[in-house]
Amino acid sequence: MNRLMFKENYSRLSVSFLFSILISCAPKVYNVEISNTMFVERENESVPLLVNKLPEFISSNIENYGIYDASTKQFLISQVIDNDIDGSPDVIIFQPQLAPNSSKLFQLIKQEKNTVEIAYCYSRIVPERIDDYTWENNRIAFRTYGPEAQRMLEEGQKGGLISSGIDCWLKKVEYPIIDKWYKGSFEGVSYHEDHGEGLDDYHVGTSRGSGGLAIKSGDQYFMSKNFSSFKTIASGPLRTIFLLNYEDWEGPEGPVKEQKTISLDYGSNLTRIAVSLKGTNNISAGISLHDNDGVIESAENNSWINYKQPHEGTELTNAIVTQDKYALGNHTSITGKPDADHVFIDLKVIDGQTIYYSGFHWSESKQFKDNMEWKSYLEDFTNKLDNPIQIKY
């Protein structure tokens, strides 16, 4: 081989070697295609990417990856969640904005996170207030009651309560208020009064509140007591999720086993409640009618019920939504007894589970213009449940 040929070959090898180094050093990128099959814009919906469907180089290091929108040259807010609490992440969720009937590519790319993301979607046990469990997002907040409150009532102590009903905390600010309101209550600032952020003046008592469960048999209703244990799974910028376990309770056909997995996503006025049940083939989720001075409405296909009522000089509208496959119908129970009047949505239990969504709109929050806009939101919500955003890995 002459010197000229040697130089040419050496040069080619050098270029090839350099190119290989550049490729190996380049950030590894993975594309997913997200499709909206509806003729409406989609936003404030969490899209879950299954970690076990992603390449190993990403799935093994998913906490260091972000969702990148090449069209805007920006990373979207995302959240990694270990749904089954086994120490390995199961999903990474994000909320894309999608035009009607459109598809869009997003990229998973390593991301340096230099800012602390606010946990708008937050939940925790509150031992400093007996043992409430509370949860919120940027629009609404809830709480329900634990075993200590039950024990106190059973032992005749003041402040106890037996109820698996769900309480509404009426907030009108986007930032988190749970910790602030509880802290304030111990410093003499009552969260039962509105100091500019909202308040808790929704009455639950022994009623179903905003989405508690019951089984109807004749004129009698059977229901669980307070949750017996809990497990917080996640809080973060896009979703909070937790488990509530209940002691077995007596139903019309024998013992009922109940466990709730409750989640609440950023931007939603409805909290998702997935219930594992044994001992019944159907169950009902109720809304308290309080003074029976409101208006009850329902969807033609029974996918939602709605109760609009006057509320301390304002207006409060509670709703329960479900998918068509779980919907059996709805009914109203009027007894005239305290905390016993409700409108219920009746739900099928399929393979030991039923899923529904409970939430509300408070007129002071200004989140919806009026009841018509709120009902339009409920219709859109149910349609989107039946037409989820499609993911192509």
Image (cartoon, rainbow, N blue to C red):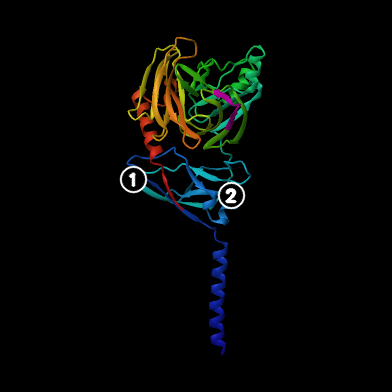
Identify the secondary structure beneath mark 1: loop
Q: Amino acid at mark 1?
A: Asn
Which label's residue is closer to the chain start, 2 or 1?
A: 2
Q: Nearer the viewer, mark 2 or mark 1?
A: 1
Question: Is 192 situated left or right of 131 in this image?
Answer: left
Q: Is residue 318 visible in this depiction of the protein?
A: no
Image point (51%, 56%), residue name:
29
Q: CA distance from mark 2 to mark 1?
A: 31 Å
Residue furthest bottom in the image: 2
For residue 388, above or below residue 123: below
Q: Quadrant of residue 366?
A: top left
Residue 166, position as x, y percentages in the image: 52, 23
Residue 63 among those drawn in magenta: no
Instruction: Tell me where the magenta segment starts and ends, as one range.
Output: 243-250
Q: Amino acid at mark 2?
A: Asn
Q: Main secondary structure of the magenta part?
A: strand
> In the rendered image, which residue does mark 1 sit on?
101
Q: Quadrant of the N terminus?
A: bottom right
Residue 248 in magenta?
A: yes
Residue that label 2 marks: 64
| Total numbered labels | 2
Report the front residue among 9 and 274. Answer: 274
Which residue does the image show at 44% across and 23% down from the upper left? 365
Q: Residue at x 56, y 18 (%)?
A: 191
Secondary element at tag 2: helix
